[in-house]
Image (spheres, rainbow, N blue to C red):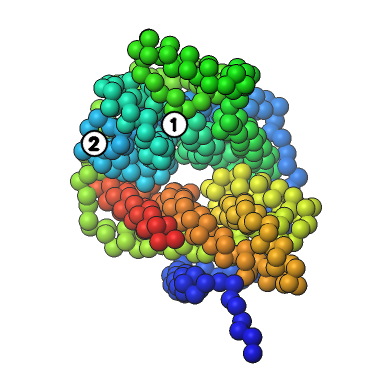
């Protein structure tokens, strides 16, 4: 009797089983708490379709007199994203130098710097916007500051991790010859890490295009405010045109930044280097001799990419032009800066009288985040399997699915939630449904990339044994991509929780509604307690999945 050889190791089976049991338990608990029933969407399918076809379709343009204003709002959104990201990146670079224990001249202060950035990062941008609106009023200047805060915190973490991931040989060799801290930064850190820094900078621009649209909905200016005004006035056909415009803007920015990222991360090559390689070691010896004569500290930590200087110059010019276009009244902001301190002092005076309401709202927010994540996880695996070119081997289907979900992903989550609110009414059901749309699109893209990264030899070996497509997927592709799926799931849970914390501000229930209502009613003690709880839960989720990834 032949012994059956399992394609999945026993330890992996236990891990998968534990993951599946935890997912089922969370699904039952969160489904019971939110009372979300997907059959409600099915039953309301006819009404939803009628709403789309009768009120939204076909898209219509605003009156000719309003078109310049719409285009101007798009330019404001782009300018906000560009200028706030650049300002945050410059500040984050200098702060991150003190956040890495391997680089900082004061290693004991590194934990404080990272803790401060963690606090800023785990409070959503829209919450910061509401806090700043309470003290500074509405306007593009406040939107700029709110985006700067979250971008700064994100890039501090990213830059610190980039510095700690690279080899420390250059830094240590410079320290050994007595190089000062500025010399170590200029001759070792910057050459070794610049490509990584710029890659994160481009990613942050992509994120801020969506974030600036969201912040604009609550008074930060830009196309978000324009879109929200048309939705509130029931001009849905014009709102659809603006949604399509926002989606096109996001897709174009993603494509451009993706192309730039490839250029930045490309291995540099130059004709001069090729000629030197042909001449052998003579050139190298001569170069070393010149270095000794000039008594310079040798680094050689990284090759130069000729594309980067031009890219940096273009970013500087665009950022300055963006700031000029926004016409921010900096003097007014500076004069009202003391009011920010007063608001923070009021927020720190926690009011526990409404703790039961805050706790109930927080449970609702966590339930919405987890439930939408689990629904999207199943849908993302399914559509990722269909879109992966190495599984079904249907290129046309892959292009069709990825194009469709690229559009869904390009539209910010609050827009989908607003559409669901119109169809399903106020409450967590709209939050779950709207968040599922964007999360499913995110998972489909991410899982497709993970599935396509599986070695082709593994799939061909199973095909040779007569294994069907479903068998190949369940026994080879899915287990091989499991660790990546867990990583993407953890990352998305952090995002979902942050988005759920703000979706209540547009009527989807949860802690966001408590924060916005109390800030608008000047009940800062209650709002401050709710914001603190948001930070603690977000930080807990972040640390949990850091531990899980280490176990993987």
Q: Quick one: SS at disc 1?
A: helix
Residue 530 rendering spot, x and y as whole percentages? 31, 52
Q: Which quarter of the picture shows residue 342?
A: top left
| Quadrant of residue 381 within the rendered picture | bottom right
Mark 2 neighbour class, 10 Å CA radius: few under 14, some 14 to 19, many 20 or more:
some
Kindly give the residue lying farthest to the bottom in the view shown. 1
* Above or below: residue 215 compared with residue 336: below
Q: Residue at x 49, y 70 (%)?
A: 12
Q: Is residue 382 above or below residue 77?
A: below
Residue assigned mark 2: 107
| Residue pointed to by mark 1 | 193
Using the rendered image of the protein, determine whether residue 304 is visible from the camera's viewpoint: yes
Q: Would residue 229 be seen by someone viewing this image from the given angle?
A: no
Q: CA distance from mark 2 to mark 1?
A: 19 Å
Q: Residue at x 62, y 70 (%)?
A: 475
Residues 234 and 261: in front is 261
Q: Residue at x 42, y 37 (%)?
A: 166
Q: Locate the C terminus by quadrant.
A: bottom left
């Amino acid at each position: 009797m032949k012994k059956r050889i399992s394609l999945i190791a026993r330890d992996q089976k236990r891990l998968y089983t534990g993951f599946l049991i935890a997912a089922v338990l969370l699904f039952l608990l969160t489904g019971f708490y939110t009372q979300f029933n997907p059959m409600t969407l099915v039953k309301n399918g006819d009404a939803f379709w009628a709403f789309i076809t009768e009120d939204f379709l076909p898209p219509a343009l605003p009156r000719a007199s309003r078109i310049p204003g719409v285009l101007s709002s798009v330019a404001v959104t782009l300018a906000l994203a560009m200028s706030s990201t650049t300002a945050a990146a410059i500040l984050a670079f200098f702060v991150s130098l003190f956040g890495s224990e391997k680089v900082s001249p004061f290693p004991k202060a590194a934990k404080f710097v990272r803790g401060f950035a963690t606090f800023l990062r785990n409070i959503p941008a829209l919450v910061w916007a509401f806090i700043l609106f309470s003290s500074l009023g509405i306007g593009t200047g406040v939107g700029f500051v709110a985006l700067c805060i979250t971008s700064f915190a994100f890039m501090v973490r990213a830059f610190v991790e980039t510095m700690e991931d690279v080899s420390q040989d250059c830094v240590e060799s410079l320290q050994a010859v007595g190089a000062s801290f500025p010399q170590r930064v200029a001759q070792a850190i910057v050459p070794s890490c610049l490509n990584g820094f710029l890659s994160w900078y481009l990613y942050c621009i992509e994120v801020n295009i969506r974030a600036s649209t969201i912040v604009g909905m609550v008074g930060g200016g830009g196309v978000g405010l324009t879109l929200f005004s048309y939705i509130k006035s029931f001009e849905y056909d014009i709102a659809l045109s603006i949604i399509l415009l926002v989606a096109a803007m996001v897709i174009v920015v993603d494509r451009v930044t993706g192309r730039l990222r490839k250029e930045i991360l490309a291995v540099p090559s130059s004709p001069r280097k090729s000629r030197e390689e042909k001449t052998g070691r003579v050139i190298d010896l001569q170069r070393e001799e010149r270095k000794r004569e000039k008594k310079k500290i040798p680094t050689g930590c990284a090759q130069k990419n000729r594309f980067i200087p031009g890219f940096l110059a273009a970013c500087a010019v665009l950022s300055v032009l963006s700031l000029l276009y926004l016409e921010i009244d900096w003097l007014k902001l500076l004069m009202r800066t003391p009011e920010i301190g007063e608001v923070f002092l009021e927020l720190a005076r926690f009011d526990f009288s409404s703790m039961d309401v805050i706790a109930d709202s927080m449970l609702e927010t966590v339930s919405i985040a987890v439930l939408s994540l689990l629904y999207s996880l199943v849908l993302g695996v399914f559509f990722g399997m269909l879109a992966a070119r190495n599984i079904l081997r249907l290129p046309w289907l892959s292009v069709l699915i990825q194009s469709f979900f690229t559009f869904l992903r390009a539209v910010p989550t609050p827009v989908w939630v607003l559409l669901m609110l119109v169809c399903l009414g106020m409450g967590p059901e709209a939050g779950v449904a709207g968040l599922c749309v964007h999360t499913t699109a995110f998972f489909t893209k991410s899982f497709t990339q993970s599935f396509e990264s599986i070695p082709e030899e593994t799939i061909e070996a199973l095909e040779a044994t007569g294994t069907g497509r479903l068998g190949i997927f369940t026994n080879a592709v899915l287990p091989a991509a499991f660790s990546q799926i867990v990583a993407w799931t953890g990352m998305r849970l952090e995002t979902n929780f942050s988005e759920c914390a703000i979706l209540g501000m547009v009527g989807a229930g949860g802690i966001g509604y408590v924060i916005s209502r109390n800030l608008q009613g000047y009940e800062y003690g209650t709002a401050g307690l709710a914001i603190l709880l948001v930070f603690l839960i977000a930080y807990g989720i972040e640390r949990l999945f850091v531990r899980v990834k280490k176990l993987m």
